[in-house]
Amino acid sequence: MAGMSPLFRRKPTQPPEHSENHLVTLIRKPGCHLCDDAQLVVEKVCADLGVPWEEKDITEDRGLHDQYWEQIPVVLVDGRQHTFWRVNEERLRKVLTDQYK
């Protein structure tokens, strides 16, 4: 579709092993220690499973700021909110491996 944004046309950077076409998004802000902790979990789980992830800075996107400011860090899986503040490694791993079985 010509009108789709590049985000929706994005191809995974690695072939997924357990989950097809998943994308994890970490919404964070600079200088946030909870965001740093969340990023470590997201990086580990996504690397283990071969799932692509992206980072978005809430200070650079007014829509994200308005929606998630009081919850950051926020983790989205396939564009839907998975969790906020603290990321549980086992829970993230489970949603990425079990959701579409």
Image (cartoon, rainbow, N blue to C red):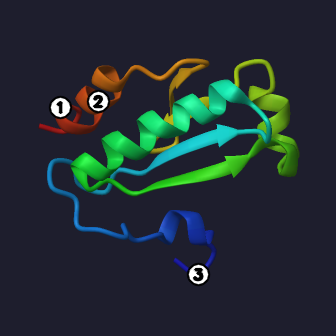
Q: Is residue 100 above or below residue 71?
A: below
Q: Which residue lies at the image location 23% right of the left edge and 33% below the top edge?
A: 99
* Residue in the image at 28% along x and 22% along y: 90
Q: Position of residue 4 (x, y in %)?
A: 59, 70
Real-space CA distance between mark 2 and mark 1, rounded to the nearest whole angstrom: 5 Å
Q: Amino acid at mark 2?
A: Val
What residue did someone put label 2 on? 95
Q: Which residue is mark 1?
A: 98
Is 54 on the left-hand or right-hand side of 27? left
Q: Which class describes the residues within 10 Å of circle 2: few (<14), some (14-19), or many (20+)? A: few
Q: In 3D space, how far apart are the residues under numbered discs 2 and 3 (Cα atoms)?
A: 31 Å
Percent across and percent down for residue 42 are 44, 39
Confirm or deny contact between disc 2 and disc 1 (CB under 8 A): yes
Q: Secondary structure at mark 1?
A: helix
| Mark number, residue 53 | none
> In the rendered view, does 95 fall on the left or right side of 9?
left
Q: Position of residue 22 (x, y in %)?
A: 34, 50
Identified at 27% across, 37% down, the residue is 96
The residue carrying mark 3 is 2
Residue nearest the viewer, comparing 27 with 41: 41
Q: Pointer 3: residues within 10 angstroms few (<14), some, or many (20+)?
A: few
Q: Secondary structure at mark 2?
A: helix
Q: Nearer the viewer, mark 1 or mark 3?
A: 1
Mark 2 vs 3, N-terminal side: 3
- Category of crowding for the residue at label 1, using alpha-carbon neighbours closer than 10 angstroms: few (below 14), some (14–19), many (at least 20): few
Q: Residue type at mark 3? A: Ala
Q: Position of residue 9 (x, y in %)?
A: 48, 71
Q: Amino acid at mark 1?
A: Asp
Q: Secondary structure at mark 3?
A: loop
Q: Based on the displayed image, in which of its 4 quarters is residue 14 positioned?
A: bottom left
